[in-house]
Amino acid sequence: MYAVVRSGSKQQKVAVGDVIEIDAMGAAGDTLTLPVVMVVDGDTVTATGLDKASVTVEVTGRTKGPKIIIQKYKNKTGYKKRQGHRQKYTQVKVTDISL
């Protein structure tokens, strides 16, 4: 059995016991619930009437994504600009999928 959950603007396929990275939220040890978009159980696919369905996850820690370098350059004008960004993520472990 697995589910497709929504976290922020992203959707991810999860099963019980999976460890995934979502956008930063919660502190270590917290329990969160994520909304369900679709549930697949063997041959049965449920995509409607999932108002009460939820996926329970436990926050295990914080991580950071890869460094992204933004560079702007204009020829013959002496204009150069460099900026970096590193996205913050939260690692969570899926503990339960309920319908």
Image (cartoon, rainbow, N blue to C red):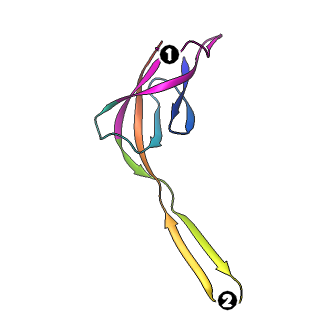
Left or right of 33, for residue 10: right
Report how far apart the C-alphas of labels 2 and 1 lie in the structure. 57 Å
* Residue 98 in the image: above or below residue 94: above
For label 2, the SS is: loop
Q: Which image quarter: residue 44?
A: top right
* Residue 92 in the image: above or below residue 42: below
Left or right of 62, for residue 85: right
Q: Residues within 10 Å of mark 2 (few under 14, many from 20)?
A: few
Residue numbers of the magenta segment: 32-60
Residue 51 forms part of the magenta stretch: yes
* Residue 73 in the image: above or below residue 61: below
Percent across and percent down for residue 33 are 40, 26
Q: Which image quarter: residue 76?
A: bottom right
Disc number at residue 61? none
Percent across and percent down for residue 41 are 58, 13
Amino acid type at circle 2 is: Thr
Quarter holding the N terminus is top right
Q: Which image quarter: residue 19?
A: top left
Disc number at residue 51? 1
At 56% across and 12% down in the image, what residue appears? 49
Would you name the residue on which mark 2 appears?
A: 77
Amino acid type at circle 1 is: Asp
The answer to which of 81 and 90 lies nearer the viewer is 81
* Residue 74 in the image: above or below residue 9: below
Q: Are marks 2 and 1 in contact (CB under 8 Å)?
A: no
At 51% across and 62% down in the image, what residue appears? 67
At 47% across and 40% down in the image, what residue appears? 22
Say whether disc 2 or disc 1 marks the residue closer to the N-terminus.
Answer: 1
For label 1, the SS is: loop
